[in-house]
Image (cartoon, rainbow, N blue to C red):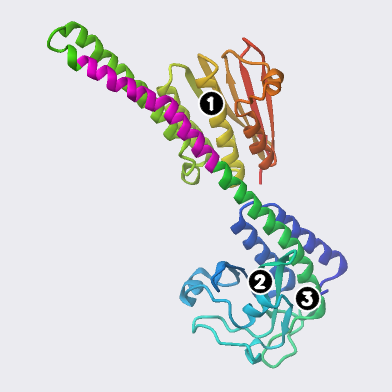
Amino acid sequence: MSQGPRSGLAAVSSALLAMSRHLEVRDVLKTIVASARELLDAEYAALGVPDDHGGFAQFVVDGVSDEQWKAIGPLPRQHGILASMLHEAKVERLADVRKDRRFEGWPSAHPDLVDFLGLPIRDGDEVIGALFLANKLSPAGGNAPCPKPDGSCGFTEDDEELLSILAQHAAIALTNARLYERSRELTIAEERSRLAHELHDAVSQKLFSLRLTAQAAAALVDRDPSRAKGELHQVALLAAEAADELRAAVVELRPAALDEDGLVNTLRTQIQVLDRAHTARVTFAGRGVRALPAAQEEAVLRVAQEALHNALRHSGAQHVDVTMDRRGSGAVLRVIDDGSGFDPQSIRRAGRHLGLVSMRDRASGAGGSLTVESAPGKGTTIEMEVPGG
């Protein structure tokens, strides 16, 4: 190994911790590549995730500027050394990649690679990626000049062993990130289905009533103008209620605002809309909350939306107070209503959960916790705590 035992172990530990800290696939890929490049003191590092069409679904590099990457052009195909790592699933350690019989050249803007170390990342028997490094910068981690005339240092067996260890943990981190993203896609599909049912049950029924009432008003205009006026007043009320239902549904379809406005501002905006759309008073206060990782912010937003949905649609609450407070590097969300409340134990025994299972799953998936306090006639408090980055 190129570093002393203690410093080498610390570097490996830091790399593994960095990989386990992320849930998004793209973030995991970037962390793996940056960790490998730093750990083995290479000039360049890259990781490709293959698609089913002879190319790469994703390809992440480290050591190349954005300008250089744009000049290089489209993502590489699975050919040459890259294809060997993916299809033959074996380690490739070369003194000069340009002299290998499989070398097929590269675009004019591509950096010049000499010594090369690459290996597949495997999940069981499946190859899920190809990780490679090029141009070792220092021999055995020291400051002495590289011995080769062209200035390259060459990767060693110790480097190969170290990268193999990193790749095994990279496979775990990448698989976990993929599972997380698939789980989130399923959750989004479930939410869209729930919203569709909600729109059908609430908005479509109001629109049907609106149509019948308008027809009644039209029939009464000539023979009973006074009654027609009353029916038209009812039309106006039904239209306002339908608009409120639609507005509330639209709020729940806007998680993209997180990227632009952040969690606190997104919550504040959505709660202002809900306050206008419902007879209950809905308030929000955010105190000293720092930006959280994307996965945590989305989980907090979805739990807040579910808790607000329950409070405004089912509890008969007159007041709903939402707060976000900083706790260490993380945050605490509280949604407190003065509605009818319920017995959490009886709800669980009856097989109904008012979204509590979904909220707990979201909190757990974000590395946090969720507590529910409620009793008949006593209102409900939902509290979610999530860690920081």
Is residue 348 among the parts visible in the rendering?
Answer: yes
Residue 205: x %, y % from top left? 38, 23
Q: Element type at marker 3? A: helix
Which residue is at a point 69% across and 23% down the rendered structure image? Answer: 348
Circle 2 is placed at which residue position? 130
Crowd class of label 2 (few under 14; some 14 to 19; many from 20; radius 10 Å)? many
Amino acid at pointer 3:
Glu
Q: Single out the mark in the foreground, 1 or 3.
A: 1
Principal secondary structure, stretch drawn in magenta: helix
Q: Residue furthest left?
A: 222
Image disc number at residue 308: 1
Location of residue 214 (image quadrant) = top left
Q: Single out the mark in the foreground, 2 or 3.
A: 2
Which residue is at a point 69% across and 52% down the rendered structure image? Answer: 21
Q: What segment is highlighted magenta in the picture?
A: 189-217
Answer above or below: position of 70 versus 204.
Answer: below
Amino acid at pointer 2:
Ala
Q: Of 72 and 83, which appears nearest the observer?
A: 83
Would you say 69 lies left or right of 157 here?
A: left
Circle 3 is placed at which residue position? 160
Q: Element type at marker 1? A: helix
